[in-house]
Amino acid sequence: MSIKYSEYLDAVAIKYRTLSYNDLAPKAITGALPRIDLSFAQVIELLGPYCGVRVLEQLKAVVPLAAYLMLFQLLVLRHPVEAAITLGFGLVAVVIGLAVFMEGLSTGLMPFGNIIGDNLPKKASMFVVLLIIGILGVGVTFAEPAIGALQAFGASVDVNKAPYLYEILNNWTMPLVLMVGGGVGLAAILGTIRFVRGWSLKPMIYAALFPVILLTIYAWFDPNLRSILGLAWDCGAVTTGPVTVPLVLSLGIGIANAAGKGGSSLSGFGVVTMASLFPILAVLLLALFVSFSITPEEIILLAQNAAGSAAAEVPSIWDQTPIVETILGVRAILPLVIFLMFVLFVVLKSSLPNKMVTIYGLVLSIVGMCIFNIGLTYGLGAMGSQTGGVLPAAFMQLPISETSPIFDVKTGLAVVIGFAFILGFGATLAEPALNALGMTVQNLTNGAFKKSMLMYSVAGGVAVGIALGVAKVVMGFDLMKVLLPLYLVGVTLTVFSTEEFVNVAWDSAGVTTGPVTVPLVLAMGLGVGNAVSAVEGFGILSLASICPIVAVLSMGLIIQIMNKRSVNKQSS
């Protein structure tokens, strides 16, 4: 059995519409065809299906989750939805922003990746190729919609309980994103080398996990650094989104094809896995550096002084307004666009076919990111924080809930964990990329690993992970006492699994963390954490990443055993 990644790439490309660039009609756009005069009604009639399909994709992801959270809050937690109109406008901004951004990604950013990937190895040395890919890894991290969620939650951390977590999220935000981006860049470099050399994924997983586990254990035994672990391990899930995966993969596959290694059964696998592990290492290193630079007492004193100064200041129009979100959106996309243009025009001395289409796509990317950032602040983030803040009312007394506690402690905890399980299961099954992966694996294994088996394995794993993560926040048990044993189980299963199932399993975690799920789960975790006075609410995403890996590897081993038994029966 040999799993090739090319068919899965095609499916992911269709999901992100990366092929639409080649399917457009350039002659009509450049004016080579006669001009067609249309009335306003005809323009609306033509644009309706074009826009409707793209908006509908995002509605399928956003509306069920939003409806589930609102209904649960109203019917089970018996708490009204606050600022419902603002939340509604925020969710509309999320849908429109993502629809516009994804269209811009496919028509503007992706052609750069395809052209650069095809031409870079032909016109530059391997050193220059790897350098450009490394810088690109940083750029795509800034452009990742979900990365903004991390930057929005710094103020919710109690500096007295978690000084280093507070310091990194509030005063080291830019270095944090740069370090995470550096991790993605390193993963992209190693992934490209792996494409060209045809390396196995297993040794790379072991090599990447070894320093990560060592630094994790070091931070775990330091009471001041322990609070940083949830953030560090969550950063691995944040980076594998709709910008990083298709853009880095298209570049890597193009280089592999140019090197004559694109047809390998390993082509494309591993970048998502490495892009999940190296950011964890990068954040742990940053936390270590910060701990050597400033003491917890100094952080608390500076935070208290800053709070006093802020209280005396008149609020500025630049504080928490859509203007700020718009600026952040431009800052996220524009540097990546400028860098891609530099590589294409200066390094490769090439030009873009269909320039009008590409410019149109780039404008859409920037506008979409700006709209999404507004929706993230006033829609997804606010909804997750609100539901998370009320969720503990199921089992404990809360000042904001007159009916709390709604249930006894055991029943309430069961309700909260069950809520998280259903949220994770439903959100994962709604991911289009998981559908694509499931169909591809079914075809390439000749039906041995059915699409439904993979999808339910991954969705069940994510559901268990999110349920464990919420339980960790509300019950206060140590994240590492659950996460490290799960990774040990994952590594053990990896040793006994075939290369093909290892590739599928370790990459499957990356396709489940989309731009809607990540901010929502992060906000919910921090909201629950604040309500129960937890030190921090991170760690849910990290558990939601390892559990599907364990689930798919376990399913793969079961299938291997069943296949061996059937072969033995036939031979006997």
Image (cartoon, rainbow, N blue to C red):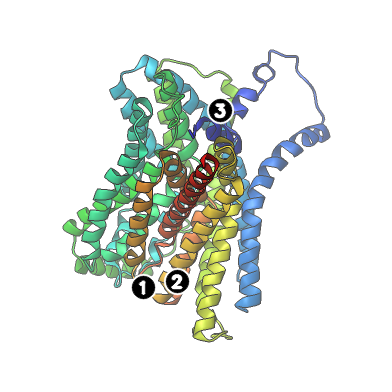
Residue at point 48%, 57% (across, down)? 317
Q: Residue at x 53, y 67 (%)?
A: 420
Q: Secondary structure at mark 2?
A: helix
Q: Give x and y (percent) for residue 304.
A: 29, 70
Identify the element where label 1 is drawn. loop
Q: Amino acid at mark 2?
A: Ala
Question: Is residue 161 left or right of 370 when viewed as pictured?
Answer: left
The residue identified by callout 1 is 477
Q: Nearer the viewer, mark 3 or mark 1?
A: 1
Q: Position of residue 85 (x, y in %)?
A: 65, 64
The amino acid sitting under disc 3 is Ile
Q: Is residue 129 above or below residue 565?
A: above
Relative to 68, 314 lies left or right? left
Q: Which mark is residue 359?
A: 3
Residue at horizontal 43 percent and vertical 32 percent from the top: 266
Would you place residue 416 above or below residue 175 in this image? below
Q: Earlier in the sequence, mark 3 or mark 2?
A: 3
Q: Report the front residue among 271 and 158.
A: 271
* Disc on res. 397: none
91 left or right, relative to 202:
right
Image marks 2 and 1: residues in contact by CB distance under 8 Å: yes
Question: CA gap, disc 3 to disc 1?
Answer: 50 Å
Helix, strand or loop at mark 3 = helix
Looking at the rendered structure, the kind of residue marked 1 is Phe
CA–CA distance in space, label 3 to label 2? 47 Å
Dot 3 and dot 2 residues touching (CB under 8 Å):
no
User: Which residue, given by chain and number where applicable, does mark 2 sit on?
Assistant: 471
Are circles 3 and 1 on residues that touch, CB within 8 Å?
no
